[in-house]
Amino acid sequence: MTTQPSGDDAAVSYVSTGRLPSGHRIEALLEEAYGRFRTNDQGACSQVHPALAAVPPELFGIAIVATSGAVHAVGEAGCEFAAMGVSRPFVFALVCQLLGPDGARTKLGVNSTGLPVDSVAAVERGADGRTNPMVDAGSLATTSLVPGASLDARWRLLQDGLSRFAGRTLALDDPLYASAMRTDDAAGGLARLMRTRGLLEIDPAEVIDLYAKQHAVRVNAKDLAVMGATLANGGINPVTGERVVDAAACHCTLAVMTTAGLYQTSGDWLCQVGFPGASGVGGGIVGVSPSKGGLGTFAPRLDEAGNSVKGQLVARFLSRRLGMDLFASKPTRS
């Protein structure tokens, strides 16, 4: 359904509109999804860091936040976990706001690599080494663009921006951050390679520090749903009413989430789910249906690609039932 403006159509922007179903319907579907998938024991917790491997694998939470600000949740939706890669679209949105979408796209690239999230080949095979902000290389490049006179200043800006997306102050998981700084040699090597290709704006050691911190930010499924709903709402947090980024930054971010948010399985996600999403090995998934709302899930068992098994099942189940699938259509009346 579209708006029906008056006047010269050439001077008017048409946007997608529509609403989620009633609150009662949403809550009933969340309960049904939780009941259907709660006992699924496929996959395994991430082994990237000991803290991730130790997360109780049965934890499971789902949340939906509408652009009206209505919040619906079930299960362990308030249980905190490390954001990991699910932080990436929001860091990119903040950088888009600072540089402009075209400036961010030019510096970082936005096309899917079709390769695993941690692929070094994605940097080496391209003439300019650009990837996209959802994979490890592109995320490092994105993080290097966060401005500030010092490392602490850059971190404060990043933490504040992510917190504004969530509508509350997001804390750092200090043990996980410390573990990442001790053990993430792969990210360090990738950062040094990217510096030689001119793809990092600051010293690799500082990039790795910021990168480890953004991944160690603690969120819950409700936070992710609010963050997703903020992107769905043109950059205004529907719970707090605060503008976090502008609509142009949201547009570019949602485009990148669509093409690369689930890494090398993004095409499968789009066919099965049909709306922009992003995933992290902490067990979180965020989804966005523009103008309607955001989905947040937490379930730490992952598939081979590093995406939450239950989170994907929930997204598939809810997508069309809630009218979130951007690609669903039906014949018009003749």
Image (cartoon, rainbow, N blue to C red):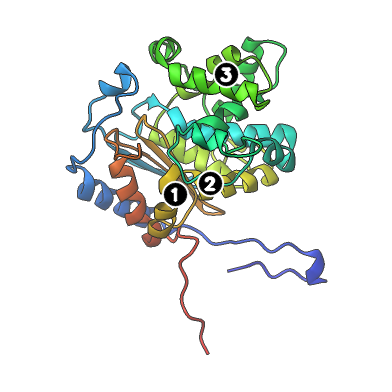
Q: Nearer the viewer, residue 91 or 135?
A: 135
Q: How many marks?
A: 3
Residue appearing at x 60%, y 61% in the figure:
16
Amino acid at the residue labelled 2: Ser
Dot 2 alpha-carbon crowd within 10 angstroms: few under 14, some 14 to 19, many 20 or more: many
Tell me the element at label 1: helix
- Per the model, the C-alpha gap separating discs 3 and 1 is 28 Å
Residue appearing at x 66%, y 32% in the figure:
95
Residue appearing at x 34%, y 23% in the figure:
48
Query: Which mark is nearer the camera, 3 or 1?
Result: 3
Horizontal placement of 221 versus 195: left or right?
left
Which of the numbered marks, if any, corresponds to residue 192? 3
Question: Could you say which quadrant of the image residue 219 lies in?
Answer: top left
Amino acid at the residue labelled 3: Arg
The percent position of residue 83, horizontal first and vertical second, equals 43, 28
Of callouts 2 and 1, which one flags the residue occurring earlier in the amino acid sequence? 2
- The answer to whether mark 2 and mark 1 are in CB contact below 8 A is yes
Is residue 24 visible in the rendered image? The answer is: no
The percent position of residue 159, horizontal first and vertical second, equals 57, 21
- Per the model, the C-alpha gap separating discs 2 and 3 is 22 Å
Tell me the element at label 3: helix
Tell me the element at label 2: loop
Residue annotated with mark 2: 112
Residue annotated with mark 1: 266
